[in-house]
Structure formats: C-alpha cells, structure tokens
Amino acid sequence: MAVMKDNQGSLFYSQTEAGPGSTTGQPLADRMRPRTLDEFVGQEKLTGAGRILRRMIEDDQLISMIFWGPPGSGKTTLARIIAASTRSNFINFSAVLSGIKEIKSVMAEAESCRRSTGRRTVLFIDEIHRFNKAQQDAFLPYVESGTIVLIGATTENPSFEVNSALLSRVKVFVLEELSTEELVTIMKRALQDNERGLGKFSVEASDELLRKLATYASGDARVSLNTLEIAVSDLARQQGKTAESEAQSINTGKLVLTEEAINEALSTATLRYDKAGEEHFNLISAFIKSIRNSDVDAALYWLARMLEAGEDPLYVARRLVHHASEDIGLADPNALTQAVAAMQAAHFIGLPECKLALAQATIYLALAPKSNSVIAAYMAAAKDVAETEREAVPLHLRNAPTSLMKRLGYGKGYLYAHDFEAGKVEMDCLPEKLKGRKYYRSGNRGWEAACGKTVEK
C-alpha cells in the first residue's frame, strides 16, 4: 500500500513519468501504459471527446466509481491517468494485500488530510471484488461524507461481488474488450516508441501478423504487448541484438517479425480463462444455450473455448448430464445415456483424449429432439410439496408386512396393474387433496410423442 501526500509522491506517478532509464525490468505493457487520455486507446463511449468520464477527469470533478471490465481493457490505466491529473490526495490500495487494519489507517489519513488541508482523498482499490462484506462496509461512511472518492477496479460483476449499500453509492462504468484493430494500434505504437517501447529494435511487422496476435489476445492489451515483446526479444537474441546496441547504432539491420516468431511467443502464453469468474459462467451458459437451440456448431465452439483454456472436463460432463434431462428428457431417453457415458470417459481417460467423448455427447445432445417436460413436471410437483400440507400416504398404497398393519387397513384396496389387460388401472395414487393433479405434460417431439398416448389412456 502507498499513501501519497501529492501526485509527485505517487506510486503511479513514478511508474508513468519516470525516464527511460527507470524502465529496466518492466514488462512492455507497463512501460507503454498511456499517461494521458489522448494516449488512451479504446473505450470511446467513456473517454472520447465530450464523453462523461473524460469530462469528469479533465474537470477534476470526480465521483465514487467502479471500473468493471475484462483484463487488459484499461481499468488500472484510467486510475493512473486520474492519479496524474487530480488535485486530490491519491492513495493506491490493494484488495489482495490489505485488511480492516489497513483500511482504518487509510481512512484516518484521509480524514486528517481533509481537516488540515481541505483536500479530498481519491482511493483507488484494485480487485475490489476481493474485499469481503465487512471490509466493503468500512468504506461506506467515508464515501457518504465525501472524505474519500472511491475508485474500484474489478473483472467480476459488481452486482454479485460488491455490497448493495456500497454499489448504490457509486457509478459503475463498464469497459469493453478492446477490438482487434485497437490492439493493433497499441502494438504499432510500441514498435515505434524509442523511449518506452521497442523502437530501438527497428522491427518490421505486417498488419496480418499483428492482427493474428491481437485475435489471440482476445481484447487484452497486456497480453498482446507482452507476447509481442517475447517475440521481438527472441528474434533479437537470435540476431545478437539488444536495445542498447541499437541505441549505439550497432547491428542496425531491421528485425522482421515472422509468423514463426509469433507462434513461438504464443506457445508460451495461455488463453485467458478464470474458472471462478464471470467469464467461466458466461461460457458454460453459451454452451448449454447453444445445445438447447440445437446449434451444433456453436456448441462445439464453446466447448473448445472451455477445454482449450483449461476447464475441468468433469465440470463440462456434469453440465451435459444435467442438460440431457432438463432440455431433452423423454424426447430422446438415450441422450442421458450418452451424457453419462461421456462423463465416465472423462473420468476414465482424462485429458486430452476425453475431449472427443465430450464432443460426441455435445453433438448428440445438440441434434436430439428437445423437451423440457421433465423439469416442468418435477418443478410443478415440488411446488405442491412446498405449498400444500403434508398429507398421509393413502392406506391402499401403504406396505403391509405385518398382521397389525393389515388389520389397520394398510394395502386394502390396492389394485395390481399387471392383473389388468391394459397394464393400467383407475386408482388414485395422490393424497386426497391433490387428486386430479397433472404434473407431467408430454411433449410432441421424438420418443415423447408416444409417451403422450400412454398418459392419455
């Protein structure tokens, strides 16, 4: 945690305004971080000319806010730009490293600053979703009184991760993934920048290769820049070049970025995927909804997105088993068999071979006729269980293993269905007050169409 009396002592200031000699060891993404709104790329709806967030920053008229967006979309960068431009006391606070004790200490500092100088404190909290309820509640009175302007950054949906009391007192700004062309623009700047970027290497890079890298980065500027740096650094080592030698006009031939170099760099990176975050649930939701819509190609795509990013195959298998009953059911009873077989295969052989078993089940379920009659029937029955009194089991349905039970009427009047030609007999099997209830409504697709005829008899 860093507490600053003014911007000149700011942690953000030292990283963004220091000279080129201080960037040694910093990743390219940190060195190229925009220092002003004019350098900032993307989020035009928020930071474009005349837009609300730009006006707030330029006029130094800040309110408490939360930046919500995917990794590499500019959340921390916007906070650093605010740090460089605000006339307030600025504090950078990590939700990962700080607890209630640190929060109280910072709040005391903010109150002291306000009393002695009249200046407000802007408190930036990275990964605010990591704070628990008690920690978030500790900020409330200071936000309400205006002692602090809270700026939070999160990759998680604030609706689920931020207390409603705190959420009602802040403005949520939604940041979107950067587009492929925006990432290409950012990488070109890095290749041309002699002070903070890779300009000293004189790199030639085609738009096609930069777009390939940008596509892989999936809207994440940090991933695209750091992967680009890996590729350029590897080429430079192969040709005996360093940034220092280029600065001294030694080995002045240009580096040509090749597809092989990009592929090598990409092989060292990993797809962005948070198994516990919102993206995890977004992808599985897209997967199941594609199967439900019988869109086999989309279902396979979302399956590959999850598995190639490292999702647990058994998690996917469990969802397939559930889907087989919820969305297919008796329209094709074999769907559940296929899903369970895929789950057993995933457990038995594991990755990577089980990908094919999961793909087979995905294709089968996507192509199967659909029916939600199973879940509808069960939910209707469960509703009656929850909302009606617990009636006793009718006597004729009770088991009568002892003579006492027989004398009490247990089992009396029970009709054995196999004794009748139709294999079905008119006999009430529901409690007295629920007689006549209809929970199962047969669909008219696939095998279930025949089920409807049985129900109607």
Image (cartoon, rainbow, N blue to C red):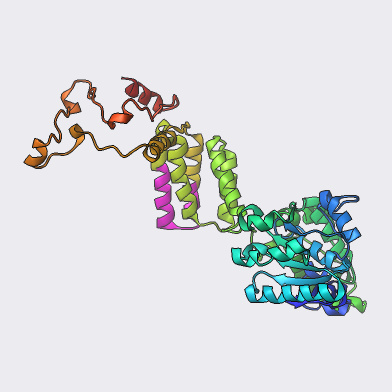
Q: Is residue 233 above or below residue 429?
A: below
- Please count the marks in the image: 0
Pick the residue in front: 261 or 49: 49
The image quarter in which residue 435 lies: top left
Residue that lies at the very extreme toward the left in this rendered image: 403
User: What segment carries the magenta color?
Assistant: 338-358
Q: Nearer the viewer, residue 88 or 456?
A: 88
Residue 81 in the magenta stretch? The answer is no
Is residue 351 one of those drawn in magenta? yes
Q: Residue at x 87, y 50 (%)?
A: 51
Q: Quadrant of residue 373?
A: top left
Secondary structure, magenta segment, majority class: helix
Looking at the image, which is closer to me, 118 or 29? 118
Side of 60 where 389 appears, left or right = left
Instruction: Name the residue rendered at 28%, 30% in the picture.
Output: 432
The location of residue 301, given as percent across then percent down, is: 60, 45
372 sits to left or right of 2 = left
Asked whether the viewer can see residue 33, the reply is: no
Q: Is residue 176 above or below residue 28?
A: above
Q: For the C terminus, which image quadrant?
A: top left
Location of residue 244 in the rendering, given as x and y in whole percent from the top left corner: 86, 79
Percent x, y of residue 403: 6, 40
- Residue 209 screen position, x and y as percent: 78, 56
Q: Quadrant of the N terminus?
A: bottom right
- Against 106, residue 256 (above or below) is above
Q: Is residue 194 visible?
A: yes
Residue sitting farthest toward the right: 249
